[in-house]
Structure formats: structure tokens, C-alpha cells
Image (spheres, rainbow, N blue to C red):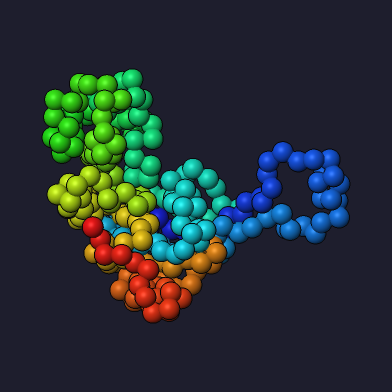
Amino acid sequence: MASVEFRQVSKTYARHAGRRLARQFLADWFRRPGDEEFYALREVSFALGRGEGLGVVGGNGAGKSTLLSLVAGLSWPDAGEVSVAGRVVPLLELGSGFHPDLTGSENLRLTAALLGFSRRRTRELSDQIVEFSGIGDFIDEPLRTYSSGMVMRLAFSTSIHADPEILLIDEVLAVGDQNFQAKCIEKIFEVKRAGATLVCVSHDLRMLERLCDQALWLDAGRVMQQGPAGEVLGAYRASAQAAAGGHSPFSAPS
């Protein structure tokens, strides 16, 4: 059974969903159906088993974030089916749910509860989370005294220790300094070796080649190519270089 499967999935959004003037409502009577919609995803299909990784690439507006939101259950398809079997842990906007007036320890416990930890499990993992984050004695200080890097390290550490069965990653691999980045990447490999499924969005193609078995190239919501990561990412890299006049738009990882 697949951990994550998309079957002919399409997702549309309204172009002008905000407040409208009366004349705009009048114009709607004469507009053809569909004129006010655009496809964020159009007929996307793929399947991932346990321990597999999918790298998703494409330019801005390609549909990458929409795909992640569908896997996470934050939105629903307008056509097709999305099947997700397993505990989903998103590494998307790290620290977005933290409260600046709470201590690091309090934010840790709050985030752990939101991720579904029991109190017992939170107590068991707290020391590991703090040690991995490198926060040290600052864990009992208010979050407003933290640097942005400290906040991201604590958020990453809390999420990655949440026993994920499906891990969603969106451009969060550049967490902290180089030593901590390497530590994060090794932890992701450890989680994958334990059987977790990865869905990873990044402009760092080298990292996707390391983490992922398969790749999906999207453009304006459509699948341009999918298959083995090396083949798809190579084709995407060549296309981007050709569009940039032979110069690579992808910088080497820092």
C-alpha cells in the first residue's frame, strides 16, 4: 500500500476572491465559466511507498506548495483523489506556531502537543530535542530572547523527533550554521532509513538527488516529467540553464 498517492489530482483557485465592486458582480453574468479560475495543479498522479523520497521541483507558481498542502491535509483537491496513510509531520514554516512570550521549554511542550505527543512521550523526548537543537540553558528563557537561528533549530528538532511516517520538507534544510545543517540532513536520512516517506521541495538540486529516489517536475501545475530523481533533476537543470542562456541558475549549497 502506498504511503502517499495522487490519482489525477487537480486543484483550482479563484483569481479574484477578495472584495468586489457592484460592476464586477455584473460582469460575472457575462463571463464564461472558468474565466476566474486558474489551475494550481492539473491531473497530477504519483505513488510513494514506505522509505521512498520524492523531490518536487519547478519555478515560482509551479504548484509545489499546493502539492504539499494537499499531502498535509491543509486543502483538498477539486478533482481526483489524494490518499495519505501514516503520521504526517510537516517541516514547512519552522517556528511559525511559537509564542515569543513563552520559554523555549514551554513552546516545545506546546508544539509537541499539537503534533500529537502524549505528556509521557514529551517528557521522554525533551532531553533529546534540547540536546539536538543545541539551545542549552536558553531552553528556559523567553523565545523573544532567541536569535532567528535558535528558533529554527528548536522548531526543527521538535518536529524531526515526532516519529514521522511521512515527512514534508519545504526549503528548510538551511537551518543554522553548516555544522547544524549537516546534522539536520543526517537526521533526515536516519528518519528515512527507519521507513519514513519524504516529500521534499527545494531549489537545492544536489540535496534532492541525495535525499530522493524519485522526482516530479511541475510547471504551471502540469507535470513536465516524473521518474528517477537523477533523470528528472538532470532534465530540469538542463532546461533552466538553457533558459538562463547557458548559465546555471542554481547556486552551490552553502
- To which quarter of the image does residue 205 belong? bottom left
Residue at 37% from the left image edge and 57% from the top image edge: 201
Whole-percent x, y for residue 110 in the image: 32, 25
Q: x, y percentage for residue 101?
A: 33, 20
Residue drawn at (14%, 25%), measured in percent from left and top? 137
The answer to whether 152 is drawn above or below residue 204 in the figure is above
The one of 167 and 30 positioned closer to us in this rendering: 30
Apparent side of residue 43 relative to residue 113 in the rendered image (left or right) = right
Image height check: is 202 above or below 235? above
Q: Residue at x 53, y 55 (%)?
A: 81
| Residue 74 falls left or right of residue 47 | right
Location of residue 238 by image quarter: bottom left
Which residue: 47% across, 44% down?
73
Quarter of the image with the C terminus is bottom left
Quarter containing the N terminus: bottom left
Viewer-proximal residue among 73 and 245: 245
Q: Nearer the viewer, residue 113 or 130?
A: 130
Residue 45 in view in this figure? no
The correct choice, above or below, for 124 with respect to 68 in the image is above
Residue 252 visible, this orientation: yes
- Residue 57 spot, x, y in % from top left: 41, 64
